[in-house]
Amino acid sequence: MSEVQTPPSKGPFTSEASAKYRIFVADDDAASRLGLIVSLGAVPGVQICGRATNARETVRMAKRMRPDLVVLGMNLRAVSVVETVRRIRNALPRTEVLVVTPHDSPEVARIALRAGARGFLSKSDPHEELVAAMYEVRKGRLHVTRLVASKLETETERIAKLDASPDPTLTPQEIASVLARSEMKMQTEFAQIVEPRNRR
């Protein structure tokens, strides 16, 4: 498998003593895959160390290449995103995963992040946001595309407020009930995605 090299230069992924930030690109669409390789490969300090066209190949090649970051750009069903992210993270705990998808569903974003992804972007996001996401992930922070983040924030705003600063009008039992319902909702959403696959 060939590597796409980038010229040495200063940037957010370089330092005097650091090696290249190695990125593995996985996308089942040839044009999209090439776009990611060209876009990411142009960032100073970044090296594209490999590429893949499907989930199975991604996991196999990532184990071999041991990249710093896997950019998972495949148009996968939600359950496949979860499985692929988990397999990569289980096999390579030091490798982070950034999901780049044509979907902007907060449900898919939520389960991808819970599976171990450190970032979630839409393919319609500009190059600048992709670079920003890589930078945030490398720093150990989560990065979610603005549109999805706003949807997630809307859905979880009340729960987060209750968790951080309980409403004095609610009893401890009522607060616990609200939080429990939120967790049950998350588990139900995940089960609805996973169970059809398990019945095959």
Image (cartoon, grey):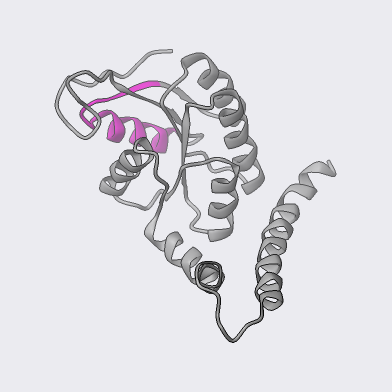
Q: Specify the farthest residue to the bottom.
A: 169
Residue 150, above or below 89: below
Q: Is residue 7 visible?
A: yes
Judge from the rendering whether residue 115 lies leftward or rightward of residue 48; answer left or right. right
Residue 124 covered by magenta stretch: no
Residue 19, above or below 190: above
Q: Which image quadrant for residue 186?
A: bottom right
Residue drawn 67% across and 73% down?
178
Image position, residue 88 (x, y; %) = 57, 29
Quarter in which the N terminus is drawn: top left
Residue drawn 65% across and 37% down?
83
Quarter in which the C terminus is drawn: top right
Find the magenta span and give its range.
Answer: 30-49
Q: Specify the farthest residue to the left.
A: 10
Residue 120, above or below 20: below
Magenta span main SS: helix
Q: Is residue 72 visible?
A: no
Foreground of the two, 180 or 129 = 180
